[in-house]
Amino acid sequence: MNHIPSIATNLCSGYRFGFNGQEKDDEVTGQTGSHLNFKFRMYDSRIGRFFAVDPLAAKYPHNSTYAFCENRVIDGVELEGLEWKSQHKWSDKVIDKNHIKSIGFGYFIGMTYQQAWTVMAPKLLKSKEGDIYDCANLSVTVMVEFAYNFKLPVYIEDYKGKDKDPTFDNDKYGYKDNKGKWHSYNKDDWKSLAKDLGKYYGAADLYNNSNLTVEKSFDDLQKGDLVGFDYTGVFHSQTVSDVSDSNWDWDEINDYYKTIQGSLSGDQGVPAFEKEYNIDHVKSGGTGAKAKALRWNTENFDKHK
């Protein structure tokens, strides 16, 4: 069973809040500050226990019914029964031991979550190979899954005028549609977040919307980056799973990239598949489209955390 230690309280006159920013309740034990009101259950700091089990305990059988803050008292807060909230920024360094373990051999000291994305994106893409996705939904899904697993913010907003698509903020886990109706879903359900995003934001948004993506140089293409195509008003999106140069090429500039891509619009029902592209061919319009190298605008995500 997991407990948190007894908390020294602030006895300053008139100050009503204690550990985790929760309000003290002195009606039972007097002005000792030992009881904290976590809204859905009360906590006694003298014995390091809640008086009741987590009201969402039945949904999380893998956790102790008395667990506090997912057992992460240093970098997390108890969310009063609401189980998910972003705790890191993409620009933060990865120091969480579980996150380091998930990243594996690609981890290095001082790595940021933005850099961790370049390691994890190919693995997430590979896990979706053979499943049915359209191109943009696959790109969105792997990004949202990574953000959820590593407790990172996702903030998606439109760039258009009057007929704006709704804004998504994964800490709110819901959105208001264009008719003003609020839609919400379970706090830990990242799949619904990705699916809802896909209803409104497609390959054209990934290509054009600087709130979502930022253009970069093909010469600096990395794993986890996006490649967007504009076939004169018809758009396509890919997430890069690997980059490489020719065996005989010593200029240190990558010549090829691989992607596991979803289907083009009109090709619904085609499973996600791996394909290799020559970067110079793509840059020069050899595919019949104007192409951009892109990356997710994680600075914008962090700004709204």
Image (tube, grey):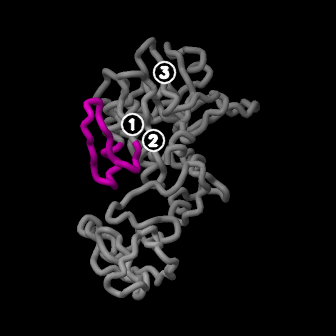
Residue at the image position 45 percent from the left and 15 percent from the top = 231
Residue 62 position, x and y percent, is 32, 70
Q: Which residue is mark 3?
A: 229
Q: Is residue 185 left or right of residue 115?
A: left
Q: Determine whether the residue tagged by mark 2 lies in a helix, strand or loop.
A: strand
Viewer-closest of 203 and 118: 203
Q: Amino acid at mark 1?
A: Thr
Which portion, as a residue range, is magenta? 169-193
Q: Which residue is mark 1?
A: 167
Inter-mark Cα distance, 3 to 2 = 23 Å
The reply to whether discs 2 and 1 touch (Cβ–Cβ < 8 Å) is: yes
Q: Which residue is mark 2?
A: 155
Q: Determine whether the residue tagged by mark 1 lies in a helix, strand or loop.
A: loop
Instruction: Name which of mark 1 and mark 3 comes first in the sequence.
Output: 1
Work out whether 181 lies above or below 170. above
Residue at the image position 37 percent from the left and 49 percent from the top = 172
Work out whether 204 lies above or below 6. above
Instruction: Name which of mark 3 and mark 2 comes first in the sequence.
Output: 2
Q: Amino acid at mark 2?
A: Tyr
